[in-house]
Amino acid sequence: VTLDAEASALATQIGAGSVHLFGHSYGGAVALQFALRWPERVKSLTLYEPVRFGLLLRDPATRAACEDVVGFGRRIGQEVLAGSLWQAAQQFVDYWSGDGAWAQVPAKRRPLLAARMNKVNAEFEALFADSVPAAAYRALTMPVQLLGGSRSPLPARLVLGLLAAQWPRAIRTTIAGLGHMGPVEAPQRVLKALAGQGRTRHGGGDELDE
C-alpha cells in the first residue's frame, strides 16, 4: 500500500472529468495525493483532518507529536503481526475516539473493525513513508476548506495547522466539541460546517458554534 497506489485507485473510480473531493483522515491523505498528481481534475478540496503525518517529522516544532503517533502506529502493527486484531482495533478506536470508545462499539460491529486492522496497519506504513514536503502543497490552487474537531488528538490538529500555513486563502473551521471521528459521529454538524452556517471568527480560523 502506498499513497500513490491509493490515489491511482481513486482515479479509476472517479473516471474522466473533474470533481469536488472530500476526504476524512486517511481518505483526506489520499485526496491530497490525488490532487498533487492530477490538480486539473479537482474543482475543490475539502479535508477533515487529513493524516499526512510525514509533515510533522520534517518540522522540528512538531517532531515530538510525530514520534507519538508513529509509536501508536507501530503498536497497532505489533498487534496485527501477532494476530491480535481485536486488541489492535480496541487501541485504534480508543485513540481516535477517546478512551472507552471501544466499549461503546456495538458487538456486531467489532468483528468488522477487527477485520480492517491489516489494511489499517498498511495505511500507517504508507503514511509514515510519505516524503512530500509542506511547500509542495502550495502548488494546489483550487479552493480548499480545512475542517477539524477541537477534541482531536494533537498530531491530527498539528497536521491541519501545517497545511493551513501553505494555503493562506483556505477556509479553516474548527468544530467545537468534536473529535477526529466527527464526520462519522456527528455528520450533520460537519455538513453544517460545510455550508458555512453558524461560523464565527476564532484566531487563525473559524469555530463553529455549538
Image: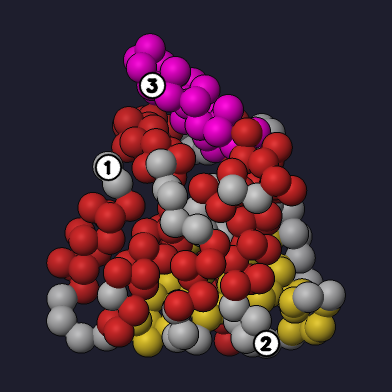
| Depth order, front residue of 116/42 | 42
**Where does the N terminus fall, quadrant-wise?**
top left
Q: Is residue 159 above or below residue 102?
A: below
Q: Which mark identifies residue 80?
A: 3
To which residue does mark 1 refer?
A: 1
| Depth order, front residue of 88/166 | 166
To which residue does mark 2 refer?
A: 197
Residue 31 visible in rendering:
no
User: Residue, x 74% and y 77% (percent of image)?
Assistant: 205
Q: Is residue 54 above or below residue 165?
A: above
Q: Secondary structure at mark 3?
A: helix
Within the image, what quadrant is residue 178 found in?
bottom right
Give the amino acid type for the residue marked by disc 1 in the picture: Val
User: Residue, x 54% and y 62% (percent of image)?
Assistant: 134
- Quick one: label 2, few (<14), some, or many (20+) residues within 10 Å? few
User: Residue, x 80% and y 84% (percent of image)?
Assistant: 200
- Quick one: label 1, few (<14), some, or many (20+) residues within 10 Å? few
| Depth order, front residue of 179/81 | 81
In percent of width and height, residue 113 lies at: 40, 36
Q: Secondary structure at mark 1?
A: loop
Q: Which mark identifies residue 15?
A: none
Within the image, what quadrant is residue 127 found in?
top left
Q: Where does the magenta region start and end?
A: 68-93
Query: How far apart are labels 2 and 1 at the CA level?
Result: 38 Å
Query: How far apart are labels 3 and 1 at the CA level?
Result: 16 Å
